[in-house]
Image: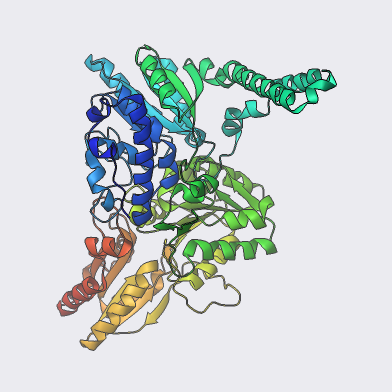
């Protein structure tokens, strides 16, 4: 049953928010949480992060004046309340749906979205750019960067902090500390932010208090007095904790020239409003540290912080339990992890590395079963690659498991450290191709283009899960340099699996179907489409050869060139951008072999534009990668005359 919202229905802009009393604002926060839970249960989305920043978002829009003041969200997947308060509540049913509301901040969607981002650790640098731009232009608006503690593990965040001191521009950084990124935070920064929980000063003072209390007369053990004394102990504990926080937690920021304040309760509206109001008057960089609970207001989300970071549609039972609607069948991510575990059990030199994406990449199970061979380096993709290079140089077999779109952030170490040194690092790229509802910042549609240009790189794409297993074995066994392969977000196809994976000959493809009229060369996920198209074409009297190249680099030059000379008509199909993609590599090969004047090539792939969010099948249709398109292009090609052949 749909809830009616007394206060939320009255708020259609930040200006409406400013008319409410503090009590009404607190009630509004409750209504927003109910609205978010209802909406996300239907569309899916980042429920945990958004439930955790309701009060913060309300306070920001109450104190500041968006869009004149600029609120820049790190990662921006926690902007649902921000969208609700800035006039987009009525479109929430379309959240993350094809041609609907984006799940991230989007400058093209609203003037209130000052800066768009789908990856983390970017907000401080971007906000500093806004602030310096404001100063140069002589304007007066406020600039606020909201960054999570997990994002502070990313190098760009500290590069931005370092520059705050250099320029001393007026900027407010809000550190939203919920002790989580997507997976639990790891590393020195995470430990630093929670250090006072176990600091020696805190423990020592606590021990001293309990020792003093133990010397009190036995009468203090009477229940009523004992409760009173325990209350004093708890009060003293909190006072000591607050003192420790003020004298230790902010040191690193103070030393960087940033005015540190906090930590504060990120769910206390009164405190947030007061602190933010004071921050408006500060003429120097200031960092406000707040503590929040990821998933606040939904018990399941609070108890399952990693899983609830991003979920599909779900149902809440009468007992309060949440059942997430799952796809039918095992996903490629789950299958990959299962097979990686199988191989890692046989060889303890295999190490799985992820960058705060153990849940998303399916590696949580690997972590549970083989913890000594698992490494989560936090949100730090470049470091993950460099770390893997060190392991490889020392004789281990590192497998870096990162979303294709996020591996882009580590391009330099892939080139400079892995490829130049020919280090045997394996790159397992999850979400190769369209990533669906997460949209343009998460689509893995550039990896073929940006990896195939690198010398010493071997690049593969499997047609199904059985071939993925073989490619994993091939990559680990190779040992001569870096190897990368991509696999989709989808459910596996259910093909018959080999009992043991068979390493593939490097650079060798396979002919799946023979025909004399033209050649279809699909990459990875496109093989199934090409085979369906070949069936339809055969019914229309056009017989196609279908080649599974397996290797994008090195290409099977012998196979492709022999078919090119024999048949003369080729269609390449890829779930990657056409610019510099697989089709381009085939054209380059034909040019190198002096075959360009004797072969007609049609490339099917993603055009030169960013593709929005939506279900994968809709996105493929939107860019024209369909069975029908393949059939249409093949028929046109079959009717063309082959260029005159000759020496």
Residue sitting at x 51%, y 20%: 253
Horizontal side of residue 196 vs 534, given as left or right: right
- Judging depth in this view, the residue of 481 and 166 nearest the camera is 166
In the rendered view, how is the structure colored?
rainbow
Residue 547: x %, y % from top left: 37, 75
Residue 77: image x %, image y %? 38, 42
Q: Tell me the quarter of the image containing the N terminus.
A: bottom left
Side of 312 where 565 appears, left or right: left
Q: Residue at x 27, y 21 (%)?
A: 133
Whether residue 458 can be seen here:
no
- Residue 96 position (above or below residue 204): below
Q: Is residue 570 above or below residue 149?
A: below
Along the line of sight, which residue is nearer the eye, 140 or 237? 237
Q: Quadrant of residue 252?
A: top right
**Which picture quadrant has residue 167?**
top left
Residue 616: name its quadrant: bottom left
Q: Position of residue 234 (x, y in %)?
A: 66, 24
| Quadrant position of the C terminus in the picture | bottom left
Count of labels shown? 0
Foreground of the two, 528 or 86: 86
Residue for point 61% across, 16% down: 243
State the residue in front, 86 or 434.
86
Q: Is residue 120 visible?
A: yes
Q: With 47 as the anchor, is 185 left or right in this view?
A: right
Q: Estimate the x, y position of residue 473 in percent, counting from the top left.
A: 57, 66
């Amino acid at each position: 049953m749909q809830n009616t919202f007394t206060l939320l229905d009255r708020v259609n802009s930040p200006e409406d928010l400013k008319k409410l009393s503090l009590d009404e604002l607190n009630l509004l926060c409750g209504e927003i949480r109910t609205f978010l839970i209802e909406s996300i249960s239907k569309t899916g989305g980042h429920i945990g992060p958004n439930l955790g920043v309701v009060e913060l978002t309300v306070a920001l829009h109450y104190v500041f004046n968006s869009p004149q003041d600029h609120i820049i969200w790190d990662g921006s997947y926690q902007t649902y309340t921000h969208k609700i308060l800035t006039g987009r509540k009525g479109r929430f049913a379309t959240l993350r749906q094809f041609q609907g509301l984006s799940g991230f901040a989007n400058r093209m969607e609203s003037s209130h979205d000052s800066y768009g981002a789908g990856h983390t650790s970017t907000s401080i640098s971007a906000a500093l750019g806004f602030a310096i731009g404001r100063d140069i232009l002589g304007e007066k608006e406020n600039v606020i960067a909201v960054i999570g503690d997990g994002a502070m593990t990313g190098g760009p965040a500290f590069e931005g902090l370092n520059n705050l001191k250099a320029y001393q521009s007026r900027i407010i950084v809000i550190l939203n500390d919920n002790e989580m990124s997507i997976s639990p935070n790891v590393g020195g920064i995470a430990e630093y932010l929670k250090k006072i929980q176990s600091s020696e000063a805190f423990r020592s003072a606590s021990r001293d208090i309990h020792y003093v209390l133990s010397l009190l007369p036995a009468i203090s053990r009477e229940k009523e007095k004992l409760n009173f004394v325990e209350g004093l102990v708890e009060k003293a504990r909190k006072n000591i904790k607050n003192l420790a926080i003020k004298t230790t937690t902010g040191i690193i920021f103070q030393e960087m020239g940033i005015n540190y304040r906090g930590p504060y309760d990120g769910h206390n509206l009164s405190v947030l409003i007061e602190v933010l109001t004071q921050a408006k008057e500060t003429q120097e960089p200031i960092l406000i540290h707040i503590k929040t609970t990821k998933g606040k207001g939904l018990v399941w989300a609070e108890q399952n912080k990693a899983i609830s970071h991003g979920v599909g549609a779900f149902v809440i039972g009468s007992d309060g339990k949440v059942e997430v609607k799952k796809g039918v069948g095992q996903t490629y991510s789950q299958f990959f992890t299962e097979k990686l575990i199988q191989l890692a059990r046989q060889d303890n030199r295999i190490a799985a590395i992820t960058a705060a994406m153990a849940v998303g990449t399916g590696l949580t199970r690997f972590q549970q079963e083989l913890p000594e061979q698992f490494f989560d380096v936090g949100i730090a993709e470049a470091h993950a690659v460099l770390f893997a290079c060190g392991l490889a140089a020392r004789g281990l077999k590192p497998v870096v498991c990162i979303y294709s779109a996020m591996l882009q952030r580590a391009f330099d170490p892939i080139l400079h450290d892995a490829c130049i040194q020919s280090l045997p690092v394996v790159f397992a790229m999850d979400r190769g191709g369209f990533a669906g509802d997460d949209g343009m910042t998460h689509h893995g549609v550039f990896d073929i283009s940006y990896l195939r240009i690198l010398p010493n790189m071997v690049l593969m794409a499997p047609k199904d899960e059985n071939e993925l297993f073989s490619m994993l074995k091939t990559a680990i066994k190779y040992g001569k340099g870096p190897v990368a392969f991509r696999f989709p977000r989808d459910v596996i196809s259910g093909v018959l699996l080999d009992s043991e994976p068979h390493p593939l000959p490097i650079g060798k493809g396979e002919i799946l179907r023979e025909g004399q009229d033209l050649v279809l060369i699909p990459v990875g996920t496109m093989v199934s489409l090409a085979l369906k198209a070949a069936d339809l074409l055969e019914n229309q009297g056009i017989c196609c050869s279908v080649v599974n190249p397996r290797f994008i680099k090195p290409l099977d030059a012998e196979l492709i060139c022999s078919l090119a000379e024999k048949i003369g008509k080729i269609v390449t199909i890829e779930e990657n951008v056409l610019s510099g993609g697989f089709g381009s590599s085939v054209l380059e090969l034909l040019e190198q072999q002096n075959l360009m004047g004797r072969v007609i090539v049609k490339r099917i792939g993603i055009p030169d534009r960013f593709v929005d969010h939506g279900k994968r099948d809709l996105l493929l249709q939107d860019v024209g990668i369909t069975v029908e398109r393949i059939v249409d292009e093949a028929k046109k090609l079959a009717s063309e005359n082959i260029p005159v052949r000759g020496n």
